[in-house]
Image (cartoon, helix red, strand yellow):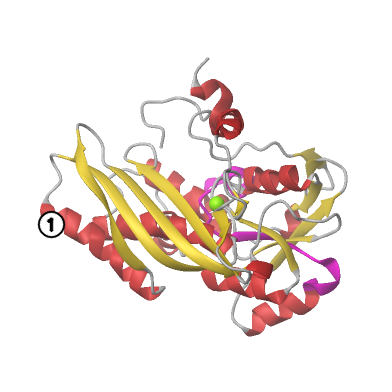
Amino acid sequence: MKLKDIGEFGFIDRIEPLCKVHSANIVRGIGDDCAVISVSPELNLLITTDLLVERVHFLLDWQGPDTLGAKALAVNLSDIAACGGTPKEAFVSIAVPDHLEINWLENFYKGMADLADKFKVSILGGDTTRSLTDLVINVAVTGLSRSGETLLRRSAQPRDVIAVTGSLGDSAAGLELLRNSLEVPETVATPLIKAHLSPSPHLLQGQMLAKSGACNAAIDISDGLSSDLNHICKQSGLGATIFEEKLPISKALRQLARRLSVDPIDWIINGGEDYVLLAAIKPDKYEELAQKALIEGYQLTEIGRFESTVGINLVRVSGEILPVMPSGWDHFRRKATSETI
Ligand SMILES: [Mg+2]
């Protein structure tokens, strides 16, 4: 048996029993967007880490070092956002192949440092080593959140509104455009490619959800709506119904789908790397929270409801009801090709 046979999440299920928790102040270990450690009665420390590997997650031909550096940090900040926290410190480790120039590496760090400055994150260290083949980047980020306001995946309730903080599918469509050089107007291609290469972490939205007292659970959409909604459902012991007509789709994605005569639903449901937040909101608090979000300049869109019956269903515009399988991004199970990306 190989990793590709059981996938990333099958692998995590196998190693989790080996990763024993030895201290009483661990609120959450493996299985959430961040590990959560209680450091005082009022405060939780959040820790997250992400690995980016050349030819698995990115190609150097597709983006400059500055946007790659920013993205390597952004995907970690997105996990802090999912817990409703404030990011504090970052540690950056890279394995560098011989062909990369110092100038490239400086620009990589400059892109990362610019994003770190924007959110007042201190980069405190890391490790640098040589790689024989590809560039490998690991970033770890710490954050803080108030004990009563830390958002986890496991506490969604039946009838909670499923809401997202941004449009879905843009990043996957952008990846498609990068993979295949299609003849598409710049006004359509640019925002989609930008969504893939330069995601913005929804930190302020996460903090708003956390402080509202209306949010029971949250996750960031990194693997894809189908997979990430499934994570919340599985951990909360629930199912969900989502409605196609409610899914927020950007103008650029609609235009691309029309030009290519394709149904964008696969990008929206399974695409991944949207880095928007998916939240479980108390049904009686949703309208008020959505209004507040609007006033503060954030998007909060209801896309469905959590249900007490296990399983996720998609109600299509046609009225057809389809079961949704968690088939978002899983590096090991995704069809093996030499270019995973
Ligand atoms: Mg996450």
Residue 24: x and y in percent read: 62, 52
Question: 246 or 335: which is nearer to us?
Answer: 335
Residue 146: x and y in percent read: 61, 71
Identify the element where label 1 is drawn: helix
Task: State which quadrant residue 14 falls in.
Answer: top right
Amino acid type for the residue under numbered disc 1: Asn
Residue matched to label 1 = 103
In the rendered image, which quarter contains the C terminus?
Answer: top left
Is residue 91 among what the camera can see?
Answer: yes
Instruction: Write the residue at 40% across / 61% down.
Output: 190
Tell me the magenta residue range. 260-286
Residue 141: x and y in percent read: 42, 58
Q: Is residue 266 magenta?
A: yes
Residue 269: x and y in percent read: 64, 46
The answer to whether 140 appears left or right of 277 in the picture is left
Instruction: Write the residue at 22% across / 47% down.
Output: 128
Total marks placed? 1
Query: On screen, 182 above or below 18?
Result: below
